Image: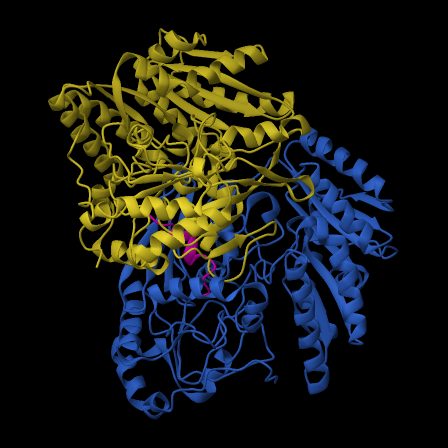
Chain colours: A blue, B yellow
Amino acid sequence: MSDAIAFLPPDQAILGRRAQIIADLEDLLPPERLVHAPHRLVPFETDGFIAYRRRPLAVALPETTAQVSAVLKYCHRYGIPVVPRGAGTSLSGGAIPQEDAVVIGLSAMTGILDIDYANRAATVQAGVTNLSISDAVSADGFFYAPDPSSQLACTIGGNIGMNSGGAHCLKYGVTTNNLLGVKLVLIDGTVVELGGKHLDAEGLDLLGLVCGSEGQLGIVTEATVRLIAKPEGARPVLFGFDSSEDAGACVADVIGAGIIPVAIEFMDKPAIEICEAFAHAGYPLDVEALLIVEVEGSEAEMEAMLSSIVEIAGRHGVKTVRECQSASEAALIWKGRKSAFGATGRIADYICMDGTVPLSQLSYVLQRTAEIVAGYGLRCANVFHAGDGNMHPLILYNINDPEDAAKAEACGMDILRLCVDAGGCLTGEHGVGIEKRDLMRHQYSKADLAQQMAVRAAFDPGWLLNPNKVFPLEGRG
Amino acid sequence: MSDAIAFLPPDQAILGRRAQIIADLEDLLPPERLVHAPHRLVPFETDGFIAYRRRPLAVALPETTAQVSAVLKYCHRYGIPVVPRGAGTSLSGGAIPQEDAVVIGLSAMTGILDIDYANRAATVQAGVTNLSISDAVSADGFFYAPDPSSQLACTIGGNIGMNSGGAHCLKYGVTTNNLLGVKLVLIDGTVVELGGKHLDAEGLDLLGLVCGSEGQLGIVTEATVRLIAKPEGARPVLFGFDSSEDAGACVADVIGAGIIPVAIEFMDKPAIEICEAFAHAGYPLDVEALLIVEVEGSEAEMEAMLSSIVEIAGRHGVKTVRECQSASEAALIWKGRKSAFGATGRIADYICMDGTVPLSQLSYVLQRTAEIVAGYGLRCANVFHAGDGNMHPLILYNINDPEDAAKAEACGMDILRLCVDAGGCLTGEHGVGIEKRDLMRHQYSKADLAQQMAVRAAFDPGWLLNPNKVFPLEGRG
């Protein structure tokens, strides 16, 4: 377990009142919806950012907005910190609790409440998994666009907290571009509704503000999301290159020409080998970098877009162009890509960075990333959403070797500073969490951070909601 | 001039210090950039919401961010209200000043600072007109998507303030979906940068919050916007119907089938007649309602989408389907639509409503709107962005007849309440301004409004920025 990142010291008075707090919460929830036995709290100690863990005071797993409201109202009254949790797949530690906090988990709120094609909208409880939404409307020819690799497990509530992306967000946008409304419970238990099945909303865009706010403004219990009609056809095409720099430059030129495929995913040689060994997707093993470009539409549309891309790739010395020949092959290609993180976990521990860069900097940042990783004597696999400039270097290390872990963390921070210095930012879709909290000062000036914290405090003046995350611990005023 | 909407009483102490304030501002700006002679203030008394006017204390027309910062810092120190102004085309009175306010106008900040195709972005000063951005990149095959009818005059700064839309936003989204970053001057003169040429940004989405905040969080001096490649081809097609309800139901079914053309615009018979008389666009005069549906892409793509739409329109008894045959005919069709407000102004005074409704309610809301207007003994023309459910009834009246004007205002408010009660909201793209300020209580609960006002106050605790607008005058705490 690492300790480079500080947590706020737990409030000893709250820890001393633990029995009373549990008894009080038992009055607010059905018995099976409150977890407090120590061995049952273990699964809630960490999330996808496994280098850090803390055991929470208790875990509430409410079934209704009213129960969420009651628990928040209680915690607000007694000054008890609250950590919201979806499926616990956060890669930035967004759901890692603290000893004096009550976790509010969404896993029991899995209802699909309304499917409304006339308004292209579905309303669901916040604990519904991302993929369940698409599954519920697939037979009618629709889908929900943002598709994080963890979409089988991650919840729409977590997606909203982190403004999650995914491979297919190049064309369709990330969560904030596909979110129409939420039911939000404020820290004092007040329930507000933001947005709805209509264009825009007057006054301040609090819906957009809540999306990506990492559970610090309130807890989302219901979401209304945009449904999109499935295209006539879709096809991933593999483009292999002799260097990462060539592949990166090709991506920048495709986008610079105004061409927007559904997805442009990037894998370097280590990532190709890891994913191919796991998924047997038919990735070429004789190239240094691979792009998976997905085009969609009618045959004619796909051919037209592909021919433009092939022409641009030719200018960057593309070595292999392979169109997939069947739906099953397409599924394998995406299985390989989407299991990249899990497949990497089979061969090493890793931390996954999430910086974004302007596309014009992609090639340079890939090259500098390799130099930084080599400088630490570490290995790295790159597999990421190239069309969006959203980098995901996976830094491989041994979690049981404290020195190796410290090197990996420091290396990751250097890479993120590189992204910021190249005109990008610290996170495209994984959130700041605890992982990147202290780096916020590298991106933002004091005035920037003060303004953000003032807005946060307008929702939660006591900083009870997910307090260890996002903003540096100092200067919170 | 109407007086149904109250203004905050001007601060007499500020009015008494007028000469000193002007002298102080003269130190901060080049001489020609400060307007204070009474006859030169007249053009700044109102905007597109002509029923209300107030003469401001002075008008600053800065050329640089540093000058904006200096003026704001001064006004902040001495508690002087500030009203930001783009081109003064607001239809909700967003730029109408008050007697004790300094107007900060953007008309001198018209520089196009950077065009960057590799990152699909243009950076411009906030006083650049909407159309100038597309004009600057058109020869290279790109454009800026949101296209308000006033795009020849309105500024990108004003577009950001109101989160403006336009006919082509059905496919491409409104301003907030096409805005990548801003330079924002806070009320105390601090300059912050939000967003940039990268996907997303960590922490709270203040960029999204600023978009649509009607100049109440700060003054935007520079904007970085998304550039989009022009399609291979684009073609408007006219669909005529025997009733508004049929046309509305057709729109709902097209969208409900998952088909997203670039634009679906609606005109009823009065709007058709007004626009045809002005533009000679060749609109059919023998129908009760007209849809202008624009499809784009290759010939094959346009044909495929059109055939689906024609099939759906057939189910709603479409009477006329007319594909345009040439680029000049297409230009005329759009000229007719985009000049609708100006053409209406030739025959009567009008107020233009801007409610949005879920598409499933379109037909019902059109029918009820007609009944409400008839109940007041008034006439109305409907011309609006049907695909987005963004209604624009133009209520015709005589501005010189106080009784008629009062009826028109009351009628408009009834229509907006109808939109809210049908699950929609008060404004899709024109903003709340002063026009709809007092109706915010019909849309939002006290808790909703208190939360929004707390966020606003986190930027401008003294409520100096555009204080007569958006939020009801009572309960600002």
In this image, B303 relative to A456: left or right?
right
Of residues A13 and B294, which is closer to you in this image?
Answer: A13
Q: Is residue A7 above or below residue B59?
A: below
What residue is rendered at 44% in x and 38% in y? Answer: B31
Q: Is residue A227 above or below residue B146?
A: below
Residue located farthest toward the left when viewing the structure as drawn: B403
In this picture, which residue range is highlighted in magenta? A203-214
Can the viewer see residue A343?
no
Image coordinates of residue A17 in percent, x first then y, are 31, 90
**Residue A61 quadrant:** bottom left
Image coordinates of residue B320 in percent, x first then y, are 43, 11
Examine the structure image and report whether residue A320 is included in the region drawn in magenta: no
What residue is rendered at 81% in x and 41% in y? Answer: A313
Of residues B462 and A63, which is closer to you in this image?
Answer: B462
Residue located farthest toward the bottom when viewing the structure as drawn: A16
**Residue B395 quadrant:** top left
In this image, B40 relative to A49: left or right?
left
In this image, A225 relative to B420: left or right?
right
Placement of the N terminus of chain A among the 4 image quadrants: bottom right
Can the viewer see residue A260?
yes
In this image, B412 relative to A354: left or right?
left
Image coordinates of residue B215 in percent, x first then y, are 37, 45
Count the marks: 0
Image coordinates of residue A380 in percent, x first then y, are 76, 68
Examine the structure image and report whether residue A205 is included in the region drawn in magenta: yes
What residue is rendered at 48% in x and 18% in y? Answer: B334
Placement of the C terminus of chain A among the 4 image quadrants: bottom left
